[in-house]
């Protein structure tokens, strides 16, 4: 889905105290930034923020970080955070390639990958956020026994992700090839697939670290 260019998105978010642009200076300081010792969950590729905002409103005892590259998408989330007055969410404009510059070892307690770009061409598979290249990065920022959850509508991406997890030594806890609506934090994007009766694939797994 191509979003209309929003020329004021970057300056608007730069004025938002909840949004950080490539925050390398925050590495090792995220609990201090939230002002408590609650667990920190990270969504990579947060889009317009539907998922992370719903999670934050439902779980006040968990801190949430939303990482997104697309400023046209995430400016929508930044407005929601302000409008709802949500204190347990922070947004990061940045690239998952740079995670180790943003977080210390053990800072992240859970990772969410929701409807990530499937990169179907074989030569692009290394760009997949579930690929070993990224799993290596995640391992360097997560706490002991941290979990990772993945949702997608793409069968090939899902099956490949299960293989990546297994090859990496991640323990798969739960697999669902037709995730029930009641078990999902449904976003506008996900709802489009459900309206077409497309199955939603889900896996929850645990790092061995």
Image (cartoon, grey):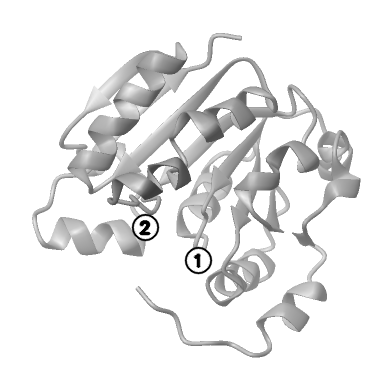
Does 3 appear above or below 100? below
Q: Give me the disc on residue 48.
A: 1
Describe residue 202's horizontal placement relative to residue 139 as left or right: left
Q: Give me the disc on residue 187.
A: 2
Dividing the picture into quadrants, the one containing residue 166 is: top left
Residue visible at 91% across and 48% down in the picture: 25
Mark 2 or 1, nearer chain start: 1
Q: How many marks?
A: 2
Q: Which quadrant of the rendered structure holds the N terminus?
A: bottom left
Residue 44 position within the rendered picture, expressed as x and y whole percent measured from the top left: 55, 47
Does 14 appear above or below 60? below
Q: CA distance from mark 2 to mark 1?
A: 9 Å
Residue visible at 65% across and 68% down in the picture: 78
Residue 3 position within the rendered picture, expressed as x and y whole percent measured from the top left: 44, 80
Does 141 appear above or below 19? above
Residue visible at 53% across and 87% down in the picture: 5
Q: Characterize the local packing of mark 1: few (<14), some (14-19) or many (20 or more) Cα atoms within 10 angstroms.
A: many
Q: Characterize the local packing of mark 2: few (<14), some (14-19) or many (20 or more) Cα atoms within 10 angstroms.
A: some
Label 2 close to label 1 by CB (< 8 Å): yes
Residue 191 position within the rendered picture, expressed as x and y whole percent measured from the top left: 25, 60
In the image, farthest residue toward the left? 197
- Name the one closer to the observer, 116 or 149: 116
Describe residue 71's horizontal placement relative to residue 189 as left or right: right
Describe residue 110's horizontal placement relative to residue 10 as left or right: left
Dividing the picture into quadrants, the one containing residue 159 is: top left
């Amino acid at each position: 889905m191509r979003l209309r260019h929003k020329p004021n998105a970057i300056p608007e978010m730069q004025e938002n105290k909840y949004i950080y642009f490539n925050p390398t200076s925050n590495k090792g300081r995220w609990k201090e930034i939230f002002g408590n010792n609650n667990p920190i969950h990270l969504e990579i590729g947060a889009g317009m923020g539907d998922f992370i905002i719903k999670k934050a409103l439902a779980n006040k005892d968990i801190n949430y970080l939303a990482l997104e590259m697309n400023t046209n998408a995430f400016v929508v989330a930044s407005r929601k955070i302000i409008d709802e007055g949500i204190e347990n969410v922070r947004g990061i404009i940045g690239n998952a390639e740079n995670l180790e510059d943003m977080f210390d070892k053990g800072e992240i307690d859970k990772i969410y990958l929701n409807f990530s770009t499937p990169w179907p061409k074989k030569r692009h598979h290394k760009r997949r956020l579930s690929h070993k290249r990224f799993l290596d990065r995640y391992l360097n920022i997560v706490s002991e026994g941290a979990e990772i959850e993945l949702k997608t509508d793409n069968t090939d991406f899902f099956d490949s992700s299960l293989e990546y997890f297994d090859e990496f030594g991640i323990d798969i806890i739960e697999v669902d090839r037709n995730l029930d609506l009641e078990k999902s934090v449904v976003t506008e994007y996900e709802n489009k697939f459900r309206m077409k009766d497309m199955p939603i694939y889900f896996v929850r797994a645990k790092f061995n670290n």
